[in-house]
Image (cartoon, grey):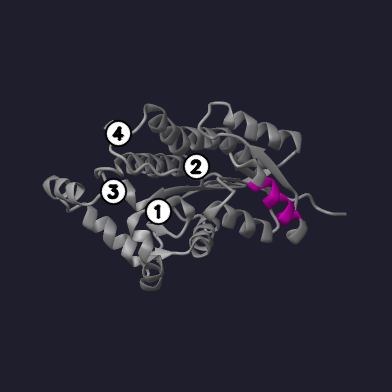
């Protein structure tokens, strides 16, 4: 008699770290609920995971910046009787323009994608996880949570919200079977970084440890999550950057912003 698998929800599963999370969790025997706006990519990924690892894989093609996204994800889980044990709030977008040059719709999207939707997913799933007797939540923040800097300020501020509400949720869940882990990454070699200037040196950055591969990032994050750790800052360089960020005065940041164009 086969035992029905428990499930992991992975947002932003079509590429980058999201795809790596999906593979690792499927390798561990979890059924997966793959969420992304790119339906073609996650349908292909679902077929691949089922074929390679023999686990059920369900697809939710939705725009996570829209209010109905959370209901769509949970409806898919309910229809397939998915017992969700893991939630990986991975989906992200990068805004690298000054606030005054950024379309209001784009500002609304990054806030919804990084803040509103992940928080509501946690709100809906934590009671179910408690009832089931076990649950793991992994939220993805960034070292930019310490960077109230020109151009990347909106990205960093949303990641600071992730860091803050994740800690609050973790404390609220103490003494329960649910844990909340925050992964605080620096540079990870994913499509999210796109054509940023420093990506021309990606091989050197990877070799020196200032950038890590998505495979390594996801392996470390899941290891921390299953150990129920509060936070993960994976590299020494990330920890040094966080310390440095606290020391940089506004005048220096202004000067750098005038000289360096993303």
Q: Total label count? A: 4
State the separation of the CA atoms marked 2 and 4.
40 Å
Q: Secondary structure at mark 3?
A: helix
Left or right for 12, reference 25: left
Q: 104 or 140: nearer the eye?
A: 104
- Whichever of callouts 2 and 1 sits on the residue coming sooner in the sequence is 2
**Callout 3 environment at 10 Å: few (<14), some (14 to 19), or many (20+)?**
some
Q: Residue at x 50, y 60 (%)?
A: 214
Q: Earlier in the sequence, mark 3 or mark 4?
A: 4
Q: CB atoms at circles 1 and 3 under 8 Å apart?
A: no
Q: Going by the picture, which residue comes out furthest to the left? A: 251
Q: Nearer the viewer, mark 2 or mark 4?
A: 4
The residue located at (75%, 49%) in the rendering is 56
Counting other residues with Cα less than 10 Å from the Cα at mark 1, is it few (<14), some (14-19), or many (20 or more)? few
Provide residue 150's location: percent of width, then percent of height: 24, 43
The residue that mark 1 highlights is 195
Look at the image and tell me whether residue 167 can be seen.
Answer: yes
- What residue is shown with label 4? 101
Secondary structure beneath disc 4? helix
Check the picture and name the quadrant holding the N terminus: bottom right
Determine the CA span between mark 1 and mark 3.
Answer: 23 Å
**In front: 200, or 205?**
200
Queried whether the magenta region covers residue 90, the answer comes back as no
| Distance of label 4 from label 1 (alpha carbons) | 19 Å
Residue wearing tag 3: 146
Q: Residue 105: x and y, percent?
A: 41, 28
Sequence-first tag of 2 and 4? 4
Q: CA distance from mark 3 to mark 4?
A: 22 Å
């Amino acid at each position: 008699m086969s035992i029905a698998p428990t499930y992991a929800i992975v947002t932003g599963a079509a590429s980058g770290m999201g795809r790596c999370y999906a593979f690792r969790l499927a390798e561990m025997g979890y059924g997966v609920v793959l969420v992304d706006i790119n339906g073609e990519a996650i349908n292909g990924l679902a077929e691949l995971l089922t074929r390679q690892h023999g686990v059920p894989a369900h697809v939710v093609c939705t725009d996570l910046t829209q209010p109905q996204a959370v209901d769509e994800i949970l409806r898919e889980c309910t229809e397939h009787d998915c017992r969700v044990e893991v939630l990986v709030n991975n989906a992200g977008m990068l805004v690298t323009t000054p606030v005054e040059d950024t379309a209001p719709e784009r500002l609304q999207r990054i806030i919804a994608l990084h803040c509103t939707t992940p928080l509501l997913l946690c709100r809906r799933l934590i009671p179910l996880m408690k009832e089931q007797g076990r649950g793991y939540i992994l939220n993805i923040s960034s070292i930019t949570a310490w960077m109230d800097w020109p151009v990347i300020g909106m990205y960093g501020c949303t990641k600071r919200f992730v860091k803050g509400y994740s800690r609050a949720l973790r404390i609220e869940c103490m003494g329960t079977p649910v844990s909340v882990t925050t992964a605080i990454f620096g540079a990870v070699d994913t499509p999210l970084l796109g054509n940023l200037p420093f990506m021309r040196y990606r091989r050197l950055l990877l070799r020196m440890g200032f950038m890590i591969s998505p495979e390594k990032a996801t392996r470390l994050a899941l290891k921390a999550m299953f150990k129920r750790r509060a936070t993960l800052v994976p590299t020494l360089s990330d920890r040094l950057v966080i310390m440095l960020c606290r020391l940089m005065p506004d005048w220096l940041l202004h000067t750098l912003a005038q000289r360096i164009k993303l």
